Each structure stands twice: as C-alpha cells, then as structure tokens.
Amino acid sequence: MSLSGLRLNELPGKFSVEGKKYTIVVSGGPDFDCYKLKVVPRWRKNDGIFLAAGFDIVEAPDEWRGFVRKVLMSS
C-alpha cells in the first residue's frame, strides 16, 4: 500500500484485470472507516489457483491519503 497504489492478494485466478477501471472499498471492519477508491490494474501474477494484482489509485478521498501517511509513519 502506498499513496499511489496497492496490491490485492488471493483474487480468483480468472479475475480479469485487463483494461478496466474498478471501484474498490477498503475497510478494516465495522468499527473502522471505509475508503472508496478508483483503481486501474498495473500488473498481475497468477500462481494457478489465486491471482495477486497491483493497482494504481487514480481517485481517492483525502481521508485515505491521511490514513496511508499515518500507517506508513508508524511502520
């Protein structure tokens, strides 16, 4: 995870990442904030069962940027 991208793991192997724009919601659970992001695929790696994919974030709320900065500073 960074200000400009993120990686998703254990997607179904047939998940299509070619030339699409996705809206994803990132949530830490019922007691945490949710963040709605618009992303485009950048890369994919298929191990035969699951797919890992990297996405560029093209649109995110300011709160997401604040959350990422906070997480990166604490690690």
Image (tube, grey):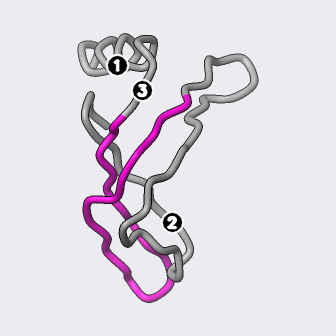
Q: What residue type is labelled 3?
A: Ala
- Is disc 2 placed on a helix, strand or loop? strand
Magenta-tinted stretch: 36-58
Point out the image quarter for the N terminus: top left
Q: Where is residue 74 in the image (x, y as percent from the top left)?
A: 29, 14
Q: Which comes before the other along the chain, label 3 or label 2?
A: 2
Task: Tell me the CA gap for discs 3 and 1.
Answer: 16 Å
Give the main secondary structure, helix, strand or loop, of the magenta stretch.
Answer: strand
Give the vertical position of 69 relative to 21 (above or below): above
Up the image or down, 24 lies above or below 36; here it is: below
For label 1, the crowd category at 10 Å Cα-Cα, with few meaning under 14, some 14 to 19 and many 20 or more, is: few
Residue shown at the point (26%, 33%) measured from the top left: 2
Q: Residue at x 69, y 29 (%)?
A: 29
Residue where numbered disc 1 is placed: 71
Disc 1 from disc 2: Cα separation = 22 Å
Q: Which of marks 3 and 1 is nearer the N terminus?
A: 3
Asked if residue 53 is among those painted magenta in the image, a careful observer would answer: yes
Location of the C terminus by quadrant is: top left
The residue that label 3 is drawn on is 60
Q: Nearest the camera: 40 or 2?
A: 40
Q: What residue type is labelled 2?
A: Glu
Q: In this view, does 63 lie to the left or right of 44?
A: right
Q: How crowded is mark 3: few (under 14 residues within 10 Å), some or many (20 or more)?
A: some
Report helix, strand or loop for mark 1. helix
| Quarter of the view holding residue 54 | bottom left
* Residue 46 is covered by the magenta coloring: yes
**Is the residue marked by circle 2 packed among few (<14), some (14-19), or many (20+) residues within 10 Å?**
few
- Relative horizontal placement of residue 49, taking residue 46 as reference (left or right): right
Q: Say if 54 sits above or below 75 in the image.
A: below
Residue 17 % position (x, y):
41, 69
Q: Which residue is under mark 2?
A: 10
